[in-house]
Image (tube, rainbow, N blue to C red):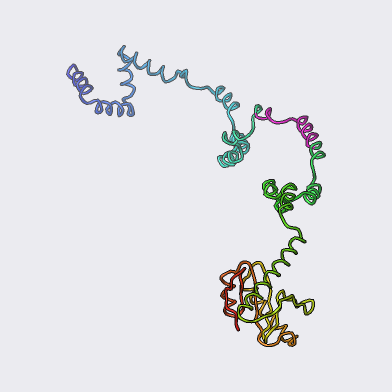
Amino acid sequence: MEEFKRLLKRLAEEDREFLRGVLLEAIGDSGAEELVETLLRSPRARARLAAELAAMITIPLNVATKEDIKMLETKMATKEDLRALEARMATKDDIKALEARMATKEDLERFATKEDLQRFATREDVAVVREEVRRLEESMATKEDLKALEARMATKEDLQKFATKEDLERFATKEDIRRLENKMATKEQVEDIALSLEEVARDYVVWFLKQRGVLCRASRLRLDGEYEFDVYCAAGGVTVVGEVKLRASAGAVERLVARVEEAVRMWPEKFQGRVVKVFYCMDASPEAVEKARELGVWLIEASRELTPLPL
């Protein structure tokens, strides 16, 4: 028997699974009662079995009772409560749509704060400004007033037509005109000078003709209102006719030739023999000399002949 105990002890230490299987088979067979009696005779086995049984039948402190479960059920939400809650709660899509409609911090920063609004005018301020604007409009000119004023006022173009102070300074004053009048010859004096010049011209023509053996008496020839010549001398088959000017130009020479030729056609009886066209002046331009030589005009400047006498 001692040998059997040692064998069981060794099996318990070395091969616990084998010993466990033997015990389970014994419990399932008719030898379970003998095994229980044998175990109950051991104080150590009895204590261990008692502890295991107590653990099996004692309700753990952390395990809920039926009453606890019922109370918990009353407090916990049912499936219907969860469905109703889901219907009332917002989904992710609802939250995204709400975020799209809600203003961000950047949006709020663009709005005016109370301090900003305090800087703006109140209704009373606006009313005062409107009244000021109304009075200003009454005192200001309208478009029609401006148009009427423009019609009455002078433009820049109008002002440019008037003389400036500088322009007036360039004009002669009354005193200047008086001094000039004192220095200038009167109409009568000019006429006297012209008559004197004509007399001098006729005297020189007579003298130059006398040098060539032609004797005549020079005078003025008046044919009608248009045709009048300052010098006219007819004698010995020669008729000398012409004009007297202070200055001779090429154009004046051409006009003299045309007038003499026209008068000869109209009054041939006044122009017997050879007709000599004469032009007497105090100053002749080079162009006048050239034109007189070209047209055969006898040009006399003061006391000298510039072109030859065509006899």
Which is more toward the observer, 125 or 221?
221
Q: Quadrant of the N terminus?
A: top left
What's drawn in magenta, residue-wise?
116-133
Task: Using the rendered image of the protein, determine whether residue 129 is visible from the camera's viewpoint.
Answer: yes
Residue 168 versus residue 5 in the image, above or below:
below
Q: Is residue 63 magenta?
A: no
Q: Position of residue 242 (x, y in %)?
A: 68, 77
Residue 261 versus residue 169 in the image, above or below:
below
Which is more toward the observer, 163 or 124?
163
Q: Is residue 24 left or right of residue 144?
A: left
Q: Position of residue 201 (x, y in %)?
A: 67, 71
Q: Is residue 193 left or right of residue 32?
A: right
Residue at 28 percent of width and 26 percent of height: 20
Q: Is residue 66 left or right of residue 260?
A: left
Query: Residue furthest toward the left?
Result: 3
Which is more toward the observer, 282 or 173?
282
In which image quadrant can residue 9 be found?
top left
Q: Quadrant of the C terminus?
A: bottom right
Q: Position of residue 257 (x, y in %)?
A: 66, 79
Which is more toward the observer, 57 or 158?
158
Task: Using the rendered image of the protein, determine whether residue 259 is visible from the camera's viewpoint.
Answer: no
Q: Is residue 120 magenta?
A: yes
In which image quadrant can residue 229 be found?
bottom right
What main secondary structure does the magenta stretch of the protein show?
A: helix
